[in-house]
Amino acid sequence: MATSKLTRRSVLAATSILAMPAVLRAQDATIKIGFPVPLTGPYGTEAKDQVACAQIAIDDFNAAGGLAGRKAELLVRDDKLNPGEAATRTLELIEKDQVNFIAGSLSAAVQLAVNNVAKQRGVIFNSISQSDQITALPDWSKTTFHEAMTPHLTAGAVGRYAFSKFGKKVVFLRADYAYGDEMVDGFKATGASMGIEVLADLKHPLGMTDFSTLLPRIQSLKPDMLVLCNFGRDQQISIKQATDFGLKKTTKIVAPILLYTSRVAVGPAAFEGVIGGTSYYWGIEANTPSAKIFNDKYRKANGNKLPSDYGALGYAGVRSILDACLRAGSVETAKVVTALEGAKYDSYKGGQEMRSCDHQSVQSVFIIESKSKDMINEYDVFNVLATDAANADNLRSCKDEGHA
């Protein structure tokens, strides 16, 4: 028995001694942030800019000394705009690469798959794609954070502006997945109190290249406005074809998210006069110091180019996590969650706050119009018409989301 006890004590002591270097290594290890985004597919342009901007947040953190000397690293993975692929890549990032945190995603449906894997394993995920569902139960968890705007917030801001100025007869053309569905729901909720009349609610598959069969039907309905609830190449193609068809002669075209990358890719003629919303436009730097600082960093790192709206979210999503690590003095999940909850910050677009009850970023929405004249350079593509200030009352209530 004595020998047995001695052996057991020896084993325990040896285990403790052997564990100490491992603990020290863990404390000094690189802070890894997994970043699954759709590098291939119809949202590839936006995803690549998210990576470029996320890397700026990593570089800033490291240049400032990191967390007591611990540097950060971005681990980018292609989720191919597919929920199954995204879940696989996220699982690999957590179990194989042993990331500390996850940020990223660029699809309402895909981000839910990423979140499901992350929350099951107790890993913080900060999403940078629009979704109403991710902040609501049952999808939400204590480790779920949402840096992006929500469709309810975005469509509400754009709807209040557009329905008061361009008429009440509306046709919706939506991409047939969660993004389109949630955006249309948001517009209808806002429009109900403003007396809009929905003439048609049309769906199209993701990645559609020919809208010619839908445009004559839309024109025959004689709407005051066509609200395009789609994204990426779908937005580029639908706006260009609607313009070529002559729809703008009688109908105002509105998009909840008017993408910078789409406007730059297609040019001023097709997008002339189109109204939309955005979480970020580089031109706010004239009145927003944090935007000027961020833009200058992007210019320096990217040949004097300027960041896109969704690219900027890549920066914000990663920076929010790293700033929380600094406030917490740790990468321990519980401590970082506490540091993120209720945080007030201004990292690139003006003041924001991470609402404690559902971990949704309360932020401004910019109402923009595409320019075709008086452009000071190739990046000067939008006029900011109005700013819907950060206001938690414009979000779905936490009670409506299922939170106590």
Image (spheres, rainbow, N blue to C red):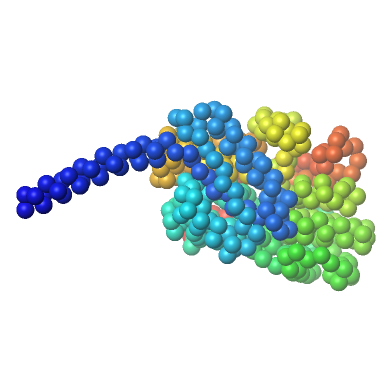
- Of residues 240 and 71, the one nearer the viewer is 71
Image coords of residue 194 (percent x, y): 72, 58
Side of 41 where 351 appears, left or right: left
Q: Is residue 389 above or below residue 127?
A: above
- Of residues 241 and 163, the one nearer the viewer is 241
Q: Is residue 361 visible?
A: no
Q: Count how many numbered circles sit on residues in the image.
A: 0
Residue ID at (48%, 39%)? 30
Q: Is residue 146 above or below residue 327?
A: below
Residue ID at (89%, 70%)? 216
Image coords of residue 160 (percent x, y): 72, 52
The residue furthest left is 2
Side of 49 where 339 appears, left or right: left
Residue ID at (85%, 51%)? 266
Q: Is residue 26 visible?
A: yes
- Of residues 338 and 73, the one nearer the viewer is 73
Image coords of residue 299 (percent x, y): 73, 33
Image coords of residue 232 (percent x, y): 75, 55
Q: Residue 78's quadrant in the figure?
A: bottom right
Q: Is residue 67 above or below residue 239?
A: above
Q: Is residue 197 above or below residue 93?
A: below
Check the picture and name the quadrant holding the C terminus. Answer: bottom left
- Of residues 392 and 127, the one nearer the viewer is 127
Q: Residue 312's quadrant in the figure?
A: top right
